[in-house]
Image: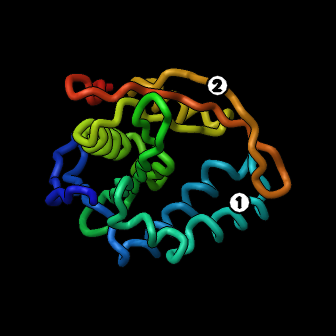
Amino acid sequence: MNQKLEANVVATPHHNLIIRFATQADLPQIAHIAQITWNATYSDTIAAENRRDFLERAYKPENLASAIDAPGHWFYVVELERELIGFGHFLRRYHRTQARAELVRLYVLPGHQSLGVGTLILRTGFAALAQAGVEQCFVSVQETNTQARKFYERHGFIYHRKHGQFLGTQIVVLVQYIRPISESGIIATP
């Protein structure tokens, strides 16, 4: 079972943010954030029907519900003035030689990007992963999403490989990054 954290209020240069574990009640708003960010990010690279089908499948509240309070899941939301503005979801993965985790979701509403929200999610998630004995975290990003790729690279993720994946009727090329997790080097300051 995940060890629950009290809500953390974090002062950034722009706002006071609260990061906490996601709850069942947050799921509709999480789906809304995913829809806005996916459409803003991928409108030029992923066909509208493929985005719609993916979002309907991946972000139905009932399909996300099993990640809430589940062992091996760290699912966070970030609030600003009682409104959710972003979320991140880390999932423990097993490898025969080491404990790994995958950052399966990290989305911040377009109007709140570049304010430290994503860094706050990474910092919180990496600390939890280190406490759980996870040694590596990986993330896959669409190759054309240069903003996200630069963000992950600034935060210590290192290129590992490229691979294609079907998304509806098209193939998208993903870049996979890996980052070591340790107690002493949880996150670099950008």
Image position of 62 (left or right of 39): left
Relative image position of residue 5 (x, y in whole percent): 17, 56
Q: Is residue 82 above or below residue 92?
A: below
Foreground mark, 2 or 1, reads 2
Relative image position of residue 132 (x, y in whole percent): 27, 42
Q: Residue furthest front?
A: 96
Residue displayed at 24% across by 65% down: 81
The kind of residue on which mark 2 rests is Arg
**Element assignment for label 1:** helix
Residue displayed at 68% across by 28% down: 162
On the question of residue 25 being in view, the answer is yes
Which is more toward the observer, 167 or 41? 167
Q: Nearer the N terminus, badge 2 or badge 1?
A: 1
Work out which quarter of the rendered image holds the N terminus and state it: bottom left
Relative image position of residue 13 (x, y in whole percent): 22, 40
Residue at image mark 2: 161
Residue at image mark 1: 51
Q: Is residue 156 above or below residue 55?
A: above
